[in-house]
Image: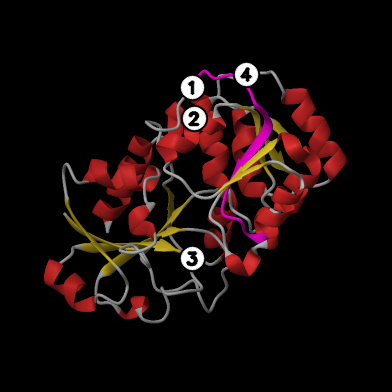
Amino acid sequence: MRIAFVWDSLHTYYGTRFNDGLYLALKRLEERHAIGYFEPQEDDLIAAFRPDVVLFWGALCGHETPHVKQMPYRKAICFAGGPIDANTVDGFDLYFTESRWNEDEFDRFGKPWMRAFGINELIFRPIRAEKKYDAAIWATFALWKRHNLFADAVGEKGLAIGLFQDHERQCYEWCQAKGMEVRGEMPKEEMVKLLAQSHVALNTSAFWGGGQRMTLEAMAMEIPVVVMADSPKNREYVEECGLGLVAPPEVGPIRDAVRELKGKRYHTRDYIMSKYTSQHYADALEKGLTQL
């Protein structure tokens, strides 16, 4: 099978940072299939590759429409989240999902979906380290990650790592103002050494804030996780696993949850290895794309 993988900014921004579960899943698929890597505007290169199917990654409100929808290939998308409606949901033959919430949405629109998600379990693994931080968050400094909640709840005992964005600089300034350790993006192989020094993974992402990878990566490292009650995509994993805490998005309850989990260690890696590894991701993508 010839698979054209298309991701906006793949050759620039993501080309230097792309090392998550999807990356590893595609590398596994390369052992059995021909995969080409493209950006949406590279029509001629995609055509020259002669793909059997085209696999996209992204939301349904950006570069995928309308240009991508007109491409004369069987198409699937690794749906990255965000709002969808009747005007944006069309154009793909299969939707790979990360969470039950989106699956319910696609059912309502009558669209075919298949769960395909996982993390880089080779990098995110249990690491023994002396604890330095009460809680850590690793996420792009964006408003819907609610770093203000994280900063107010954890203060100087926190660790915040993520991409700095000038247009939302208040997100990392909130953390800096509390005196916590704030780091920009770094290689994941280095990041996990810092994360292992944290008692808790505190995911303050809001409803549209995503953060599912962080939750699963923390579980793979066996760092106890606190997620927010208004974030159903993250709640799904914690509630299904049965380990970790769900807290209302309020400073007091978040502090209590971090305090309750501090010093504990759960064997959550077993949950990850049962269904959310890069191999699970690769197998699901292969099954869906083969059907197309």
Is there any visible trace of residue 271 in the rendered image? no
- The kind of residue tagged 3 is Ala
- The kind of residue tagged 4 is Arg
Q: Earlier in the sequence, mark 3 or mark 1?
A: 3
Image location of residue 243, percent across then percent down: 65, 26
**Of tags 3 and 1, which is closer to the observer?**
1
Crowd rating for badge 2 (residues with CA inside 10 Å; few <14, some 14–19, many 20+): some
CA gap, disc 2 and disc 3? 31 Å
Crowd rating for badge 1 (residues with CA inside 10 Å; few <14, some 14–19, many 20+): some
Q: Which residue position holds label 4?
A: 265
Image location of residue 15, percent across then percent down: 33, 57
Picture residue at 57% right of the left edge, 60% below the top = 105
Image location of residue 70, percent across then percent down: 32, 80
Q: Which residue position holds label 3?
A: 59
What is the span of residues highlighted in magenta in the rendered image? Answer: 126-143
Tag 1 and tag 4, C-beta contact below 8 Å: no
Q: Nearer the viewer, residue 148 or 204?
A: 148
- The kind of residue tagged 1 is Ile
**The C terminus sits in image quarter:** bottom left
Q: Secondary structure at mark 4?
A: loop
**Of tags 1 and 4, which is closer to the observer?**
1
Q: Earlier in the sequence, mark 2 or mark 3?
A: 3
Q: Which residue position holds label 1?
A: 127
Q: Is residue 95 above or below residue 72?
A: above
Picture residue at 37% right of the left edge, 66% below the top = 9
Q: Is residue 100 left or right of residue 54?
A: right
Q: Nearer the viewer, residue 142 or 105?
A: 142
Q: Which residue position holds label 2?
A: 193
**Of tags 3 and 4, which is closer to the observer?**
4
